[in-house]
Image: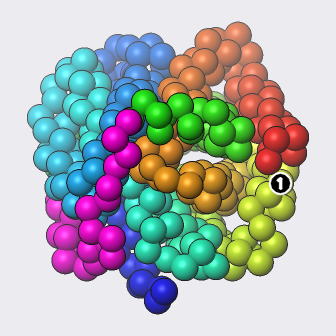
Amino acid sequence: MSRPRAFPVIVAGFSAFLDLYATQPLLPLLARTFHASNFAVSLTVSAPTIAVAIAAPIVGRVADRFGLRRTIVASAFALTIATALASTAVTLPQLIFWRFVQGLVCPGIFSIAIAYIHEEWPAANAGGATAAYVGGTVVGGFVGRALMGVLTSAMTWQAAFASLSALNLAAAAVIWWRLPQEHQGAHAVPASASRMFAAHVRNRQLLATYAIGFCILCAQIATFTYVTFHLAAPPFGLSTAALGWIFVTYLLGAVVTPVAGAWIDRYGLRTAFMVAAALGIGSVALTLAPSLVVILAGLALFGTAVFITQAVASSHVAVNAAEGRGLAIGLYATCYYVGGSVGSAVPAFLWSGGGWPACVAFVVVVQVAMLSIAALLW
């Protein structure tokens, strides 16, 4: 089995994550603009993650029936339209609604891209291809956040969303042009969807990985959402544009994660996960320092750890799903984004009582739980 080129799936990852967390650097600005609470504006982050959690198993089932490539391409163009519509919002509820719509179409790109990799790449190279794909998601996440911060400072947040839509359109065109049709064509789906679902939820390895996915995004969203409030407040007082640029810390992960793919293939999923999870626990503690440089270093290391754990966990699902891989990864995405919704909401209440240290404590607890699950159940 020959190894396909990774570029189209990297672009797919870039496209999906260009928009998903794009409002994170805008949260302090949105709170001032709409005279809203931290919790209310955080819904612009949690709404798409809730939508992803709802849509992912459905999209997985559709992809198993109608084909992986077809689902990825259609979802990429649908995301372009949803992002353009987000630029028309003039109130916070309208923005939250269109963010929810964006989340509904995202799983058709990133969840199905993982299934595509494990269908089309030789098993010995799938970990590396997944890591390359995750590298694309890292770059997309950085570009979306940085661009939103910079363009919002220069123009408006509506204009920034319109710019993201143009990038989405370009990425969708590349995916349509360069992503090969899977060799198997449209996937045959077992007659009984309920039987396949039951098989997945009885699989101990899959259940453990679903719980780990919950923890991964819960910790990531909690950290990168509420650190913006921390850095916007004294003594740092960062502007909206500067808050967008703090996500340059993602670029370390964009470099390291694809390189780590070869290490993952060599030493195995469990070992790679344990090392990366331990790094995440240690690095988030650095964000408690009074120095902006140390905080940024902590965010860079934490982000890198998160991206490696995500690459490993996604591969673990695909490896342990004997059939119905799209559905299995869809269920993983549901748990993953439910965790993201929890991570965007719970720290809002912790913030009011304990500020950033309370949020960091929450993240550490979640990370320790994730490490423990992998150690005991994988």
SS class, disc 1: helix
Q: Position of residue 311 (x, y in %)?
A: 61, 59
Q: Is residue 92 above or below residue 229?
A: above
Q: Is residue 265 visible?
A: yes
Which residue is under mark 1? 274
Q: Position of residue 131 (x, y in %)?
A: 58, 68
Amino acid type at mark 1: Met
Residue at point 80% right, 33% down? 369
The range drawn in magenta is: 164-192
Q: Position of residue 187 (x, y in %)?
A: 32, 59
- Residue 88 position by quadrant: top left
Q: Is residue 322 above or below residue 53?
A: below
Magenta stretch encompasses residue 330? no
Residues 158 and 164: in front is 164
Residue at point 54% right, 79% down? 122
Magenta stretch encompasses residue 174? yes
